Image: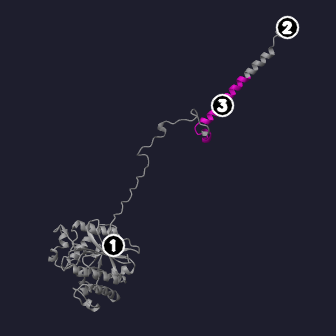
Amino acid sequence: MSRADLRPRPPRRRLSAGLIAALAMAVVVVSAVAGVFAFALLRPGGDPVAASASPSASSVPTKSPSAQPTPTASDTPTSTPTPPPPPAVSSPAAQPCESGATMLTVWAHPDDDIIFANPMISDALAAGECVRTVFVTAGDAGKGMGYVKARELGILRAYNAMRKNDGLWDAQEFDLSSGLHVRRLSPQGDARVSVLFLRLPDGNITDGGFSATGYATLSKLWDGQSATLAPIDGGSAVSRDQLVASIAELGAALTPAQILTHIPRGSAFAPGDHPDHSVVGSLVREAIGANATLAPGIRYFVGYPSQNLPRNLDDATLDAKVDTYRIYTQQDDVIRCADRSACLKTRKFGEWLQRSYPKTEAELQLG
């Protein structure tokens, strides 16, 4: 080894020591800066974008279950599903009215409608409304089916006069859902009108019935003295509940805006009326009056006692009413009248024709 190599080199040692010190200082500075940056990222309220830009298991704080409680059935708002509406009760009696509102009229005998309720029925037809008329009894007067068919023909001709068309009618036979048999007639080409016949026995003005029909009456059925009542044309007998259900079914199936019928029992206007009238009025009041939608449209017409009230029809209105009635009577040999004058002179009928008194539920003066 040469002498130069053996000489001590102090400057090189000082440089190495300084370099080491500088490096150590740099490490300290870098560590401090990194710590400050990490604090900025993790401190509460930091920039949400920066904090979530690159989350890691160590940098994203976790929350305990108590920080955000799990919703319970009582805490979570829920909406109860609305149940679907009940399906509409299907009935062979359903007849939608394409031209306007429907008027349902329910009577004891064929001719009660044109005697007591006109001009309301003829006015409805003139306005283009639909009219569905039901006759509960056959109005047979103990005379058999020949007389019944004659009265039914008279009614159809009266409706032809009111609708101003002498066309033919089609007949349809069917059973209501209640089991009651119905004969329905509709004029060809005119869906606005239909007439339904139930053909139960006429109860007689005495309320004792007729020998030809076994003295059966609506009153006995209504009061529970008879369990059932059979139509005079041989159809199946019906109970009181079935009869109520049948009228209720007709109301629900036809959805009428107005219902016309007789004064019911218990009204101040009932005494002196035909017993069949009063029962039919009570029947409609029980069957349709229980329907909150239909009940406000019911009008009860004063029957035989109307002759004691002031005359309230005259001029053209009375002329049209009498002419409709006259057309009907050409088929009813009991009350046939040839012209206006003769019809108005018919005992009692002439007085009834000159009056029409509908009553609301509130006006019945029920005792």
In depth, the one of 65 and 263 nearer the eye is 263
Dot 3: within a 10 Å radius of its alpha carbon, few (fewer than 14), some, or many (20 or more) residues? few
> Which dot marks residue 297?
1
Q: Which residues are magenta?
A: 22-51
Name the residue carrying label 2.
Answer: 3
Task: Give residue 23's position: percent from left, percent from top.
Answer: 72, 23
Indicate whether 60 appears above or below 113.
above
| First reached walking from the N terminus: tag 2 or tag 3 | 2
Marks 2,3: beta carbons within 8 A: no
- Helix, strand or loop at label 2? It is helix
Kind of residue at badge 1 = Gly
Indicate whether 299 appears above or below 332.
above
Query: For the point 64% across and 32% down, which residue is it?
Result: 36
Q: Residue 174 lies in magenta, yes or no?
A: no
Marks 3,1: beta carbons within 8 A: no
| First reached walking from the N terminus: tag 3 or tag 1 | 3
Name the residue carrying label 3.
Answer: 34
Image quarter (top left, top right, bottom left or bottom right) of the C terminus: bottom left
| First reached walking from the N terminus: tag 2 or tag 1 | 2
Q: Nearer the viewer, mark 2 or mark 3?
A: 2
Where residue 283 sits, quadrant-wise, is bottom left
In depth, the one of 235 and 324 nearer the eye is 235
Task: Give residue 266's position: percent from left, percent from top.
Answer: 22, 73
Kind of residue at badge 2 = Arg
